[in-house]
Amino acid sequence: MTTSTKKPRVSVHKFASCSGCQLAFINMGENLIKLTELVDIVHFAEAGPLGPDDEVDISFIEGSITTPHDVERLEKIREKSTFVITVGACATSGGIQALKNNADSDVWMRSIYAKPEYISSLSTSAAIKNHVKVDFELWGCPVDVKQMLAVVRQLLYGVAPLDINEKVCQECKRKNTVCIMVTKGEPCMGPVTRTGCGALCPSFGAPCYACYGPAENSNVKLLGERFIGLGLDQNVVKRKFLSIHNATPAFAEAKLLWSDTEGAQQ
Amino acid sequence: MAVQFLAPESLQNLLTVLEASGYQVMGPQLSEGAIVYDHINDVADLPRGIETLQKPGSYKLQQTSSTRFFNWANGPAALKPLLYKARQALWSCEQVAQAVNGGFVFKDLVPQAVPTAVIGVRPCDIAAMLIQDEHFIQSEYCDPYYKAERDALFTVAVNCSSCAETCFCASTGDGPSLDDGYDLLMDELDSGFLIRAGSTKGEQVLKKLPVTAASEDLTAMAAEQSAHAAEKQKRYLLDENMHANLFSQLDNRRWHDIAERCLSCGNCTSVCPTCFCHRETEQAELDGQSTRHFREWSSCFNADHSVMHGHSLRDSSELRYRQWMLHKLGSWIYQYGRSGCVGCGRCIAWCPAGIDFPAEANAISGEVELWEA
């Protein structure tokens, strides 16, 4: 079967991140070879191809925006891309590094670096959507390969990718995993966390730590109060929310809800 | 067939006979701090002497000195996961080079169900299964996926001799003892089991068991035991006009109050043995040449459950909780001739927020005098 249709052009860009989500692409295994038959990967520095300024159909973006140069680069990418899809916690919500948004970054820089004047950094770590229009978000720290493949497939079919925003609990129950919060009083973040991981941690008896970020309609206040009822300190509760996805509006509410019982340190 | 007596040491015979009759046998076992149905071939694996302590948002196991095998109330899952699968492949589609039917070949994926016998099924779970039977099999459109599993199922129900704090089946009329819907039904007494058949399949198995005729004393003792279990239930669901009451209270403040305590996580609907809402999803191969179409459990607490034309009609926990309760206790009656609640209490114990479903329903219906938590 021959087709004259041009293969979609795809790029993968990185900003402030650990590169773990790009690894999800590389970890596709056999599917990565299949993928290269379906699309032209024009830029993917971690895997080889370089063409950062090329026009593409889809740009996958990993990482958060932390420098003035990032902003320039991102705006250029947006101009050259039909679709922009964020990949992972950093690109989607600002990542764990967004904790710096609550602190005075100049003070930190001066106290750590001998020559802070060489560093050009923004005072915040921001999600991609805070700077440019994002067409679809893939949550997770890191993202799940299966989820990524499903999105690529849906885009290749020419349909809008399906956004699964239900809670982890739904997947736990589908897997017949016994609820560790109800049986063992474990402070599980599942009831406020977006599914996509396949409810991995609870299936091994470990409480969810919300690496997929807030699900839609999340009741952060109630879950936090429940954790306090289970014996957790306010500060511990606060930190559970102010973690990987601390900059999401839903989890950032924790800053106002619970006081810092360990003093004024951020 | 009359009520028979099975000695405790002959319980293993039941497992053996079921296995010899071609069933894979499943039964209650301890796993991850709860009672779950799993494969079993030895009565030693049954949760002997175990009781369940259930409260709103809490489920604990307790070892007691009792020598009984079925002294617990229930676990997180009823028969639902065995019959209405959490994720069921419905059909597959393949694109072929030769243009037949536009180049697509569709294949139905109705399962070859494995004949399965479940022992230790609770009366409320049988009641729930009969409700799901009506929904999936007896409605205008028979669901072949559910039917395949259901036809392959053999149930050994055991009347409840004790109840958890969260049980309220006596008020819904679905327990603690059972009238019909089972293949075999047992009462567990200190001296042994009363056992009777409720189907032809059940009779065939019963015939092969070393049983003797049960004395009237024993059957009276079993009836008394069930009545005692019913009396111990403090939770109840108002019966009189519950559905009309709820529908007259659409603007009740309490919906808002519940929403503040609700996580909208959908655990209640997942553990509910009668809830059947689902979504359908597509899992395509990356090359785009083949795909499988799935049905998976969903919930009225998910945003996509009420999406119409790209807009979620029930965008708050208030509207979602109201939908779940009004369907379960209200419109269910118009659909299926009875309420969708069998009083198993799972939605109370397995709610991470500890919301007390019957208490909320009663309060909204005007009954504010409630049990002590």
Image: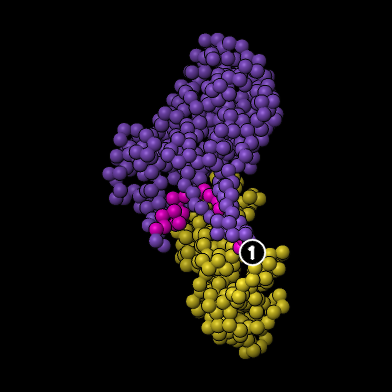
Chain colours: A yellow, B purple
The answer to which of B298 and B200 lies nearer the viewer is B200
Instruction: Look at mark 1 in the image and give the residue it sits on.
Output: B287
Residue B7 in the image: above or below residue B127: above
Name the image quarter holding the C terminus of chain A. bottom right
Mark 1 Cα-neighbour bin, 10 Å: few <14, some 14–19, many ≥20: some
Residue A229 screen position, x and y as percent: 51, 50
Highlighted magenta segment, given as a residue range = B286-308
Number of marks in the image?
Answer: 1
Q: Kindly identify the residue that appears in the image at 63 percent across and 14 percent down.
A: B211
The answer to which of B77 and B232 lies nearer the viewer is B77
Classify mark 1: helix, strand or loop: loop
Name the image quarter holding the N terminus of chain A. bottom right
Q: In which quarter of the image is residue B30?
A: top right
Marked residue chain, label 1: B
Q: Quadrant of residue B113?
A: top right
Residue B299 screen position, x and y as percent: 47, 50
Q: Which amino acid, mark 1?
A: Asp
Task: Determine if residue A41 is in view.
Answer: yes
Residue A83 screen position, x and y as percent: 53, 75
Task: Determine if residue B76 is in view.
Answer: no
Q: Is residue B291 magenta?
A: yes
Q: Kindly identify the residue that appears in the image at 42 percent across and 39 percent down.
A: B140
Q: Does the magenta stretch include residue B224?
A: no
Give the residue at the far bottom of this rendering: A117
> Is residue B308 toward the left or the right of residue A190 in the image?
left
Q: Kindly identify the residue that appears in the image at 63 percent across and 42 percent down.
A: B32
